[in-house]
Image (cartoon, coloured by chain):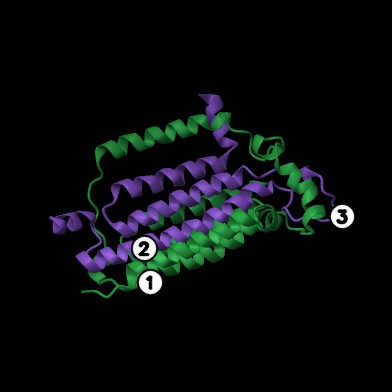
Chain colours: A green, B purple
Amino acid sequence: MSYSFELPLLILLILTAGGAIVVKDLISSVLILGSYSFFLALVWAWLGAVDVAFVEAVVGAGLATVFFLLTLFRMAPEHILIQRSPPPISAVIALPLLGLLLLYAASDLPAFGDPQSPASSHISPYYLENSLRETQTPNVVTAVLMDYRALDTMLETGVIFTSGMACWLLLGRKHS
Amino acid sequence: MLDVIEALLRRPNFVAFVTLFLWGLYITVVHHNLVKKLIGLYLVQTSVIFFLVTTSVKSGATVPIVDLAAGTAPEVYMNPLPHALTLTAIVVQVATLGVSLALVAAIYRRFGSLDENEILKRLE
């Protein structure tokens, strides 16, 4: 856990997110969002979440960018450039206050990388100790997804199917 | 006050999470463009997943793939549960993004604009 390449990655992450927000052309904004997703995948690989990094690189950076671009390519060029209007004062005041509140709560969080943190000490040791014996799968994340929570993963495909049906019903209708 | 700043300096991931979360929320609330709102929503979702994955880190541990030579002691591997749960969250996030983009496309076909104010004007 050295800080040598962690901080540049986090700064790049925030810079690409800011670029996606600030840029006025929506297509450039979406492409910058794709690069943000790739940096996020790098950050997750660094945090040891290799499965999440793969899914983010394929689904987040790939599929989401393709969805955005497919939507934007159907639109006239004058609608893809956006005009900015002055923000309401309530949002400018309320959101920094919310941010200060969140940052103030940081000292109550468990330390970064603490092996005894609440998230890592109750049930997750069980999976790490027993999943290889019970499921014969070396990858614990796969064992949890496909064996212990197989029903949940099956219902997730139901969610994907429902969203596909919703897209088809919304876009498939003939325009009168 | 000093201990809060020290706590923040030791948690750079949390500061990045707060920045991304608030930035996305701000864009979702303030912008009039529907696609820009969706970009803000995407930032909010990924920042929350980033926070969850950060809780799975144990210092000195490796990726949660059991290696028989290293044994099955829980300190050797990262916490696999946030990874498994956020995998589901990412896939569902992209599915809902697809539905919302389809809604935006349908709105654009009907009203010929992506701007919230113009759509409201044409609704009247």
How far separated are the C-alphas under marks 1 and 3?
A: 48 Å
Look at mark 2 in the image and give the residue it sits on. B101
Q: Which element carries disc 3, helix, strand or loop?
A: loop
Residue A59 in the image: state x and y as whole percent: 52, 64
Q: Nearer the viewer, residue A135 or B72?
A: A135
Which residue does the numbered mark 1 point to in the structure image?
Answer: A70
Q: Which residue is under mark 3?
A: B69
Measured from the top left, where is residue A155 in percent x and y?
55, 58
Q: Is residue A155 above or below residue A93?
A: below
Q: Badges 2 and 1: C-beta atoms under 8 Å apart? A: yes
Residue B101 vertical placement versus A120 (above, below): below
Q: Is residue B60 above or below residue A121?
A: below
Kind of residue sitting beneath label 1: Leu
Label 2, secondary structure: give it: helix
Residue furthest to the top in view is: B1
* Chain under disc 1: A
Q: Earlier in the sequence, mark 3 or mark 2?
A: 3
